[in-house]
Image (cartoon, helix red, strand yellow):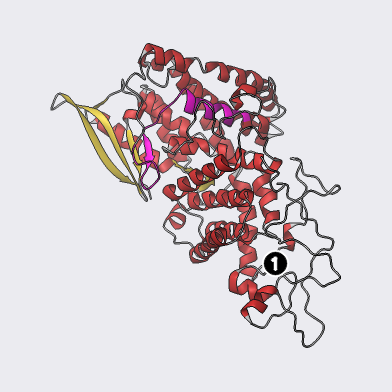
Amino acid sequence: MTNHVSLVTRFALDHKPQLTRASKPKVRTGCITCRHRRVKCDEGRPACSACLKYQGHCGGYKSNATQKPSRSDQLRPILPRLAGRKADNGFLLEPNYTSLVFADQLEKDHFDYWLAFTGTTVLFQSDLLTQVIPQLSWKDPAIKHAALAIGASALGGSTRTERMLGKGRFTSDSLVHYGKALNLLYTSPMSPERTLLACLLFITFESLRGNKAAGLSHINHGSRILEQYNPQGVDPSPLLDEVMTSFQHFGLQSWSHGGTHPKETDSRVPWCCRGRRTRYAVQEMPSAFANLETARRWWNIVRHHLEHHAPLHTGFRVEGSSATTVQRPPPDYASPESQQHIRSFARFLDAWNLAFQPLAIKAESGRATDIAGYLKALSLRIHYLHMWSGIRTAGWTDVEDIGRVTPVFRDIVALSREFLSAQGARQLLAPNGEMFTLEDSPTWPLGSAFLMCAVREVKDEVIRLFKEYPRRDGLWDTHGFLVMMEWLNGMTSAGYAVDERRHVAECDVVFREHSVMLQKKLWDPAASKWIYSGVSFSIL
């Protein structure tokens, strides 16, 4: 792989730019953009206000003959300097985003709110969102406008209805910024790294608006870019590695909604699965993790490998996405040979859990002084138990084993209640506002526990949790799960029996713009036969 643009966020500026006006009453040298447009330039530096109001960014000024010629800001490498303030993740950061020039005070308010809002959407530390992207906004108008779109959307509406129906105060502003970001992305030369960072912001924006199809489309698009840009056999640079980690984190949401996955061949492994020294990344997992962030990173790798190589299946898809049909398990998915193959992947779960245990014990003992660390460990534990039960029951095909793991379902529900109540106590959301995060949350494990566990007590507790702690986590929406669960309970109470012996993928779930359609096989006592019953629910 050729040496692409270095991916650390350090802008080597010799002097901190200041907004000044030219001292002479009449100057014939304006910014590049104003001279090209043949309009009057106010000579503001580093960007003139005329350009900011016209298109959101300024082309800058030509260098004097005595100055060293510089490369285009868009194309120059973002190289680290040898000295400076160093962040925990090894990225060098300068200048501070507060130097960023805004067209007006409202635009600055939207950017500031995006920064504050982002801090409430992540449980695990994300320097990419909280440090890297704000710094890149200094020179990249596409990233800046993408961030402003999120800030305007979040600031203008705090409730579910306001955000999903576009009734917030600044909805129009958010769409304008979103449109500018998309236009700049398509018309301006941008490095693949910056394109991927903008793509991550687009995923956040569409998830916040409840547009699953668009959010899933951005996830799939980013995955395709990574597949083309990250050749096999070459180690990624630091920032690209962080970007890959973020997209792999969104992989669970993509998989659970029927998203696409790159094809694997004998000679080529997709970027999301390949290792640096071995064929698969999961084969390079260390025997100990330095911290919970590292444990979570390797958990994403383990989980992704099991979902796509065991493999595990769901019956979910999003209307309007690239997946037009639900991917069904093969006919022999429940055969003894297939079950043995799926259970063989438990070795990766065991290895991860062994490395995670010391951190879990430490988090448990220090929960009084570090509740955030305890919540991180709790979240990982919940998802580990969910994945373990799926592998243990051979992809939910062994009905007898599903009954045996009922204690695990109870643990998932009990730990989820502890997690949700503790997170709610930290007041990570505005009063009377919805809880929106970019984390995994217990939503998917709880939904699976409801579908697979035959114990009514467990099912009822899952429904209570979704009612007490409504939330949206990326593409997941507890309200969408809740309406389906209550319908299934209602059908059971009416005398219809759910086919508990069917694989979870036999439950077709299709998400539409503001509704969800469920089709499930039920026993009709009146007709004395199995029927497929389908119904559509509003999820607003």
Front residue of 206/332: it is: 332
Badge 1 density bin: few <14, some 14–19, many ≥20, Cα 10 Å: many
Q: Residue at x 54, y 49 (%)?
A: 204
In the image, 308: left or right of 98?
Answer: left
Mark 1 belongs to which amino acid?
A: Val
Image location of residue 203, percent across then percent down:
52, 49
- Can residue 450 be seen here? The reply is yes
Q: Residue at x 76, y 72 (%)?
A: 19
- Can residue 430 be seen here? The reply is no
Against 99, is 264 above or below? above
In the image, 94: left or right of 468?
Answer: right
Within the image, what quadrant is residue 63 found in?
A: bottom right
Within the image, what quadrant is residue 460 found in?
A: top left
Q: Where is the N terminus found, in terms of image quarters? A: top right
Residue interval drawn in magenta: 298-325
Within the image, what quadrant is residue 536 found in?
A: top left
Tell me if residue 321 is in the magenta stretch.
yes
Name the outermost residue toward the bottom: 25
Image location of residue 443, percent across then percent down:
47, 35
Image location of residue 290, percent across then percent down:
72, 28
Q: Which residue is mark 1?
A: 101
Image location of residue 213, percent across then percent down:
42, 48
Against 395, is 116 above or below? below
Q: How many marks?
A: 1
